Image: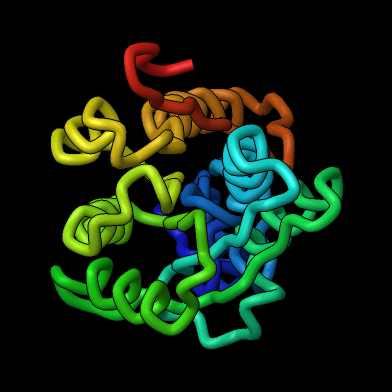
Amino acid sequence: MYTPRDGRISSYAVRAERGGLALIPVGTDAPSDGAPRFIGSGSILMGLEGGKLICSKLGSSARIGVILPTGLGSDPRDEPLYRGLQSALQSYSGARIVAVVRSKTGTLSGEESASSLLRAHPGVNALFCSSSLDTTGAAQVVVDMNLVGKVLIVGADENEEIRRYIEKGVVTASIVRDSRRIGEDAVKAFASMKAGIPVPPTIEAGFSVRTAGEGEH
């Protein structure tokens, strides 16, 4: 069962247990109301990796603008992605997050978010995006504003457009969650549960990083 972080799973888990059903929540981050088990690729680790990638290029001079996922209305500083990024910056004195915006809905949301962020904060020299739509939108804005080479982009996910931006040097890297492994681990967990074998409460599927010329690593 795909479950977003702001989803409600506890009542389903109780009903599934009563009915003798195997419920396996999957997604990015575990549901906020708790779950007996969860398989995903944590945003906090994605944020940590994004911070490392940015600071490996810019070091203590990194001035980062973050485009967070749409939807959740909580304080951005409570977001796992933000906390992971902030943690990575601790090793680079002077590196900091300058601005945070939430992506809006719509196909042009990434462009709108990146454009407004860069115009409001011209000192930003790196953008960290949390979705493929925001990554491609940010890349187009950096091209349009003639900021290629001046604003580094670390994005998320993978598609043909992102791969093209990476090869052209517009996007430095993209962090790709391992959705295939999430599915495989879910099937394994289901088989274990049906066989009466205990399943770990949390399984981290991890991610890969796509960069120019190197593919995934």
Q: Provide residue 29's location: percent of width, then percent of height.
A: 58, 55
- Residue 148 picture location, percent across and down: 31, 47
Which residue is depicted at the point 65% across and 46% down?
51
Residue 70 shows up from this direction: no
Q: Can you say whether 170 is above or below 144 in the image?
A: above
Could you tell me if residue 2 is visible in this image? yes
Total of numbered circles in the picture?
Answer: 0
Tell me if 169 is positioned left or right of 192 in this view: left
Which quadrant would residue 163 be assigned to in this image? top left
The x and y percentages for residue 77 are 70, 75
Foreground: 123 or 171? Answer: 123
Residue 19 vertical position relative to residue 122 in the rendered view, above or below: above
Left or right placement of residue 189 versus residue 178 in this view: right
Observer-nearest of 4 and 150: 150
Q: Residue at x 43, y 56 (%)?
A: 129
**Image point (30%, 59%), residue name:** 138
Q: How is the image coloured?
A: rainbow
On the image, the x and y values in percent for residue 153 come to 42, 48
* Residue 177 location, quadrant: top left
